[in-house]
Every structure is written in structure tokens, then in C-alpha cells.
Image (cartoon, rainbow, N blue to C red):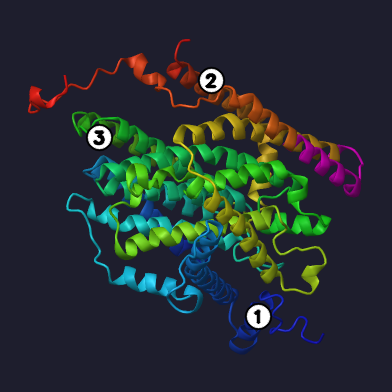
Amino acid sequence: MIEDTGIVIAFWILAIMTVANALMVVAARTLLHAVLFLVLSFIGMAGLFITLSADFVAAVQILVYVGAVAVLMVFAIMLTRENWNNEYALPALALAVLLGTALTFAALDTGWPTPPGALPAVPATAAAIGDALLDPFVLPFEIASVVLVVAMVGAIALVREED
Amino acid sequence: MSILGQWYDVRDLSELIAGLSGWLRDTFDAGDGVIYAVSGLLGAAGILAFVGVTAIINIWVERRVIGRMQNRLGPNRVGPFGLLQPVADAIKLIQKEALQPMVADPLVFTLAPIAVFVPAILAWSILPWGENMTLANLNAGILFFSAMGSVAVLAVFMAGWSSNNKFALIGAMRVVAMLLSYEIPMVLAFLGPVMFAGTMSFAGIAHWQAEYHVWLLFLQPLPLLIYFISASAELNRTPADIAEAESEILAGYHTEYSGMKFGLFYAVELVNALLVGAVIASIWAGGWYMFEIDRVVPGWMIFIGKTYAFYFVLMWTRGTLPRLRIDQLMALSWKLMMPLGLFNVVLVAAEVVVWAETDVSAGMLLPIAGLLNAALAAILWIGWMQFLTGKMQRLPVRPALRSDIGVPEIAAPDHVSAVARPV
């Protein structure tokens, strides 16, 4: 599947879009521009998921990251004063280099074994993910929902006015 | 009946595409990629043409219908019955100067109308226009539709922020807050039909209804009501148009836009309104399926007819209801529709389990489930409203956060002299 010419071209376009926009997030001078570049990067990621036939994950990527995370960031920017300081630039750079090196080594060190013969046809991912979430991975799924409930109760407790 | 299955069979336009693909394959020995690209481009062009033309026609339809409802005439001067009014409007918008505030962020200001328009068009691609007429039959169709709605939120915010105008920013913040609140009951409303049909694709849900000879409208009225209210809130149309309430914040997020950039915002509003009609038609009213009538009438005509029928209901609410206040809208979403949506999910899940685990036939279970759901929907909606209206504040109260953190009184700036202040 990945050998298809169209898929390869799409992969490179989307990969360049994702990485270039991620770089622009760091380079942008305005905080809100950085968020908009981040959104473009997220959309590129969603496109990469589509080239892997993961349509469910692609839709969730846009719904959660563009629709919820980016909008939350916009809210956070609107509620804070605009003081654009770079006093943590050096530690951030060091951390980024460290993380990037670690990930690169991990990626190069992995064997990436390919199964012999043609890849199996991809089933409908939404149904497969649903089965997986409710059968073998039901415990992590439930724990995640408990975390969400705790966060919601905490948020309500924070803003609640005493009677 | 010799035209059945031929390429010129207008009942199913996919025969045209199939004929064309066969011709390409036979004559030019074209590969699958070429055929795929050609049929995709043709379908996209058809949808774009439909959306563009209906957006122009709907300007006239909407103004005339609402004028009729409000005892006015509506546009009736340009052309017969005022039919050429949209053309006159478009010419006026095109020749207007494209104003842009000096303090605006130029790039984001220009990109915002485009960023609003793209998701509105993309969402049309997944609808079932006929039995075999779906451009993109996505497995995750409903998720894709919701994702496109949430991208539009960000585009609206781009418009409000880049205008650098306080009214635009307030309008954009209102839109974002409102859309985020209404996204939740909307997705909860979609869950009911998805659980019944066992698929998230629009074509799959329409096909399920054709298979069981029933519209989900009769089986699940409560999610339809919830979706309809959330959708009309998301559209920023009159019962819920606090984002562009002209008596409060001028025109909201598109205050600073003029000419064709404003025209795009206006067109997107109409396109989205029709899209809500199309979504209701395909999920709750069977899409192209119309009992036995769809054997005679082309499916795409039935689909467009249903779309316009639900669009008319949207115009009806717009023409007759007054604007809600922002806290009332929020209360409606969080206190009424979200609990009812959650209840509906549990109820439908129980019905699906009964259907799957016992050997009740569909002909037995579906009528009972429909009656039960309709009765429960009426009881719950009215009962919950009665229960809530006692507590729902008539006047807005001060937000709780202010008193907690002790916001100081706003002191007068130094350059304001004491004489100017009332004592």
C-alpha cells in the first residue's frame, strides 16, 4: 500500500506540511499565529493518518486536536496578558534537542520488520477500535473516563460559589 | 422501462458515472486511479455547483419566506417576484471596496473567510444523495461531520481576533463558547441513530432505514429535537444569534468585513443552514428512501426535497422566535439537553441490547421502541422543563468567579478629571 506512487507523494507533502508548520509554531512572533500554525500541523497529521487508512483516527485527530485542544489554547491566550518572553528559550532548546535525539535514536534503532507478502486488507477501523476498547482494553478505557470525571468535578468545585 | 440501468437513467446519477468509467476503461484503457480521479472530480463539481447555486437561490427564498411569516413583502422589486435580488446583491458586494482596518492582522484577516468556507463545503461530500450516490462514503462519517463543525469554530475565531475590534472579539468569544457547549448535546444526539444502525457512515444509516422500511424520525424523536436545537444554535441564526446580535455587538465577528469577504460569511451561513436540513434528512428521514415512492421518483430529488423541508422548519424558527440571552442559551444546553441526551444514549443502548440478545423480530421491536421513545421524549422534555423553570433565573446573576477572586472596582484613569465624574 505504502508503495503506491500517489501515497508516497501525499506522504511527503503531508510530512513537509506537518514539520514546517511545527517549526513555524516556534518561530512565530505572535502567540495566536503559533496556535494557527499548530492547527495546520495537526491537519497534516490527520492527513498522514488517512494515508495509513486510519480514517477514524484522522477524524478524531481533527475533532479533538483542532476542535478542542486548539480552541482551549485560544481561550487560554485570551485570558492571559500578552507578555511574550523568551527567558526559558535556552532550557527549552536543550530539552527539545534531547527529546529529538532520543526519538531519532529510538526510530533508527528499531528494526521495523515488514511481514512477508502483501499487507492484509484494512478492515473498517471504527468497528475494530470499538471492539478493542470494550473487550481487551476495557480497564484503561474506564480509567481514562474516571480521570475525566475527576477533572470535571475539580473544575466545578473551583468555580462554585459558596451558598 | 428500457432506460433502467442505462447511463442516461436520471433516477440514479451514479449510472452516468459508471457509464463514463466503463467508456474510459474500454476506449482509453484507463487505470483505476484515473477512473477514481475522474469520478471524484465530477462528483465534487456537482456538489460545488449544487451548493453554489442553492446558496444564491436561498438568499431569495429565505427573505421571501421570512417576509411572508412576518407580514412583510420581502424583496419584490428586482425582476419578477424579486427573483433577481440575489444577483443584484452579488453585484453590489463585488463592486464594494474591500476595506481592511489598519490595525488588523492582514494575513489572518484575509484567510478567515476562506477558512470558514472550506469545512462548510467539505461536509457536503459525505451525504447520501441517492442509493449509490455518495461521493465519500466514510466509515467515520459522523465524526468527520462534527470535526468539520469544530474547524469552523477556529475559523470564526480567526475572523474575530484578526479584526482587532472589541465587538468582533466579543462576538468571536461568544461563538466559541456557544459552539463548544452545543457540540456535546449534538454528538450525544448522533449517538442514538449510530447505535441503532450500527454504523457511523451517513450512507449506511440511510441504507439501514431503507432496509427496515422506517425513518429514524419515528424511532428516535428525542435526539432529533436535541440535534435540531443544537444545530440552530451552531448556525448563529435568530433564536440563537447572540454572536452577531446587532443591538449588542454590531455584527459580531464579521463587523469589520466588507465586500465579497462579508459575502462569503453570509453565503456560509446559508450553506450551513441547508446542510443541517440535509443531515436531518439523511439521518432521521431516510435520505433517498421514501417508502415506495423512491421506486418512481429519483432518489436525489427526494433527498433535496427533504432537505428543503427541514430547511423550511429552520426558516420558520428564525422568522418567529425572539433572540435568547446568552445565559439562557447556555442553560438550555447544559441543564436540559445534555442530561436528556445522556438518558437517551442509555435508553437506546438498552433497546439495542434487547434486540441483539433476545430473538425479538425487528417488526416487533421497532414499533414498541418507537412508541416508548416518543412517549418518554415527551414526558422527559416537558417534565424536565417544568422542573427547571422554577430554578432558571429570570435575570442574569453575577458570575461566581468575580466574587471569589475579588475583582477590584475599576478606578477612573488619571486623565479623567474629578469634574467629569458624577458625585
Q: Amino acid at mark 2?
A: Val
Q: Which residues are magenta?
A: B356-377
Which residue appears farthest toward the top when viewing the image?
A163
Q: Amino acid at mark 1?
A: Leu
Q: Please tell me how many numbered marks the rendered image carries.
A: 3
B82 lies left or right of A128: left
* Residue under the point 25% across and 45% down: B165
Cα distance in 3D space between marks 1 and 2: 55 Å
Other-residue count near label 1 (Cα within 10 Å), few / some / many at <14 / 14–19 / ≥20: some
User: What chain letter is assigned to the residue under label 1?
Assistant: B
Q: Which mark is residue B198?
A: none
Classify B379 as above or below B51.
above
Residue with the mark numbered 1: B16
Classify B295 as above or below B265.
below
Q: For residue A54, say whether it is visible.
A: no
Helix, strand or loop under label 2: helix
Residue with the mark numbered 2: A150
User: What chain letter is assigned to the residue under label 2?
Assistant: A
Q: Quadrant of residue B15?
A: bottom right
